[in-house]
């Protein structure tokens, strides 16, 4: 690949595939903010009427294109957009990053449209790419950057930079589009990286978090901030400092964050009440595949209920087998949590299982098909569809339409009784959506 030099202000284009939901592309935002001084353009495929055309337009003059690659259907879009950009500018450097580029860079590099894969945190590898291109040099293999399928096995993922990362430049995003999609002026924010289980967890100081939250709230007239930290409660004292700072700031800014169930159980009642008083509106609690820890989840739910905090429990279930029916277990615990507090939300998601041998030379299309493949047990797949539908409808805001209120009441009754069979009402709702819009009804995206 030949590279032209001497065009310092050529844009660095970063592309977000059109996944579900409306969460801001925080990884691309962090990368764009890290590339201080460069002309960074973030294109979010969820909001562009013709995303390929937009990327092609930029690619003709771009320095390079960075694409977030996620396993599943988004891989097809990543290939399509990259191929269109390469056709528009054969000399364009195309770098993939994100979960799939880290999981199986060889399949990405073998696609024919990808010059390099950034493994792990992308700031430093992408900075090196930009530096090489601006100097007129060819891209070189280095830590965290694989350039050929053979490099993928030798190149290790790099951790996030250990230096304090720069403030997120939200001006790189069209934030009003996200507010409009959500129906609320809700901003995504990341205040830490990594998890407490490893040695790479690092966080912004509480006072900086509070100061940035206040400034962002004033600039964008925010109603709420969502903390998208992988492990927000890794430092409980820091959480209390943030909550106290938001409380004493006087803005009454609502906020949400994630937590482990054991974090809630380990928190004193005073801490949970402080979170509620500071404006915490909801805690998000993931439940890993396998037997759900019923006693732990119910204890966490009871403590949140007592503190006046709402919660959203994310149950991840694998396909049932002769040894364990995770779907039935998840439904049972979810029903108990809903009975404990009417504000609790319980979403049930099928967990994606990677191939037994991910290094077996799978193509990107193989990966996409594997991620989309339905459960082999048709009855279990039908039970999953029913449970997902009725829990979602029972917890969905029905708005003002009488029909939606009726659907919600029926779903609430089914959840209360635990009876999801003979689901004529579900089939009617889904058929009505197809007749009205011409496409299948989508579940409410979680953001």
Image (cartoon, rainbow, N blue to C red):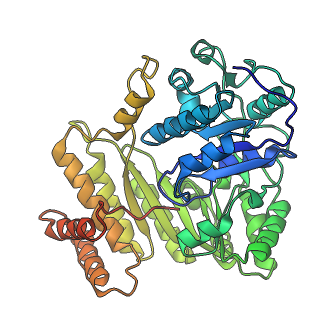
**Residue closest to the eye, 156 or 322:** 156
Going 72% across and 50% down the picture, which residue do you hit?
41
Q: Is residue 387 above or below residue 128?
A: below
**Residue closest to the eye, 390 or 246:** 390
| Residue 89: percent from left, percent from top | 65, 33
**245 sits to left or right of 381:** right
Q: Quadrant of residue 202?
A: top right
Q: Is residue 126 above or below residue 270?
A: above
**182 sits to left or right of 199:** left
Total count of labels = 0
| Residue 177: percent from left, percent from top | 61, 67
**115 sits to left or right of 292:** right
Q: Is residue 203 above or below residue 151?
A: below
Going 84% across and 61% down the picture, which residue do you hit?
208
Any part of residue 194 in sight: no
| Residue 10: percent from left, percent from top | 80, 41
Q: Quadrant of residue 375?
A: top left
| Residue 182: percent from left, percent from top | 54, 70
Q: Quadrant of the N terminus?
A: top right
Going 29% across and 50% down the picture, which residue do you hit?
327
Q: Is residue 197 above or below residue 287?
A: above
Going 37% across and 43% down the picture, which residue do you hit?
290
**Residue closest to the eye, 153 or 395:** 153
Any part of residue 336 in sight: yes
**42 sits to left or right of 258:** right
The residue at the far left in this view is 422
**Residue closest to the eye, 107 or 385:** 107
């Amino acid at each position: 690949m030949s590279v032209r030099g001497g065009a310092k202000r050529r844009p660095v284009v970063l592309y977000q595939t059109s996944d579900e939901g409306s969460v801001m592309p925080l990884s691309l935002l962090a990368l764009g903010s890290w590339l201080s001084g460069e002309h960074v353009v973030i294109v979010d495929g969820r909001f562009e009427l013709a995303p390929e055309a937009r990327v092609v337009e930029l690619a003709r003059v771009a320095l390079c294109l960075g694409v977030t690659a996620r396993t599943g259907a988004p891989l097809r879009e990543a290939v399509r957009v990259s191929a269109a950009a390469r056709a528009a500018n054969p000399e364009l450097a195309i770098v993939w990053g994100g979960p799939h580029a880290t999981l199986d860079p060889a399949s990405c590099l073998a696609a024919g449209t990808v010059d390099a894969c950034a493994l792990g945190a992308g700031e430093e590898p992408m900075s090196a790419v930009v530096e090489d291109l601006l100097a007129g040099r060819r891209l070189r293999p280095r830590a965290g950057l694989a350039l050929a399928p053979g490099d993928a096995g030798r190149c290790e993922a790099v951790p996030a930079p250990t230096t304090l990362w720069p403030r997120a430049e939200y001006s790189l995003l069209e934030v009003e589009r996200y507010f409009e999609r959500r129906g609320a002026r809700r901003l995504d924010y990341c205040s830490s990286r990594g998890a407490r289980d490893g040695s790479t967890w690092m966080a912004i100081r509480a006072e900086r978090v509070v100061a940035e939250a206040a400034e962002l709230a004033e600039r964008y007239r925010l109603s709420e901030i969502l903390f998208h930290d992988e492990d927000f409660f890794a430092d409980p004292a820091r959480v209390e400092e943030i909550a106290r700072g938001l409380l004493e700031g006087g803005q009454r800014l609502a906020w949400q964050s994630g937590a482990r169930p054991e974090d809630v159980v380990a928190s004193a009642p005073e801490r949970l009440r402080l979170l509620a008083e500071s404006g915490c509106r909801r805690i998000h609690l993931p439940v890993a595949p396998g037997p759900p820890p019923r006693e732990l989840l119910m204890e966490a739910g009871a403590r949140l209920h007592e503190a006046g905090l709402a919660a959203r429990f994310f149950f991840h279930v694998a396909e049932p087998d002769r040894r364990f029916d995770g779907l039935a277990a998840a439904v049972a615990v979810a029903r108990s949590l809903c009975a404990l507090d009417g504000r609790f939300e319980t979403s049930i998601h099928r967990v994606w299982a990677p191939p037994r041998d991910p290094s077996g030379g799978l193509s990107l299309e193989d990966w996409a098909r594997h991620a989309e493949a339905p459960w082999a047990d048709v009855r279990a797949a039908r039970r999953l569809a029913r449970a997902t539908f009725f829990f979602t409808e029972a917890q969905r805001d029905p708005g003002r339409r009488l029909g939606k209120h009726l659907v919600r009441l029926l779903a609430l009754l089914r959840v209360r009784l635990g009876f999801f069979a003979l689901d004529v009402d579900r089939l009617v709702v889904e058929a009505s959506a197809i007749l009205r819009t011409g496409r299948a009804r989508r579940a409410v995206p979680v953001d």
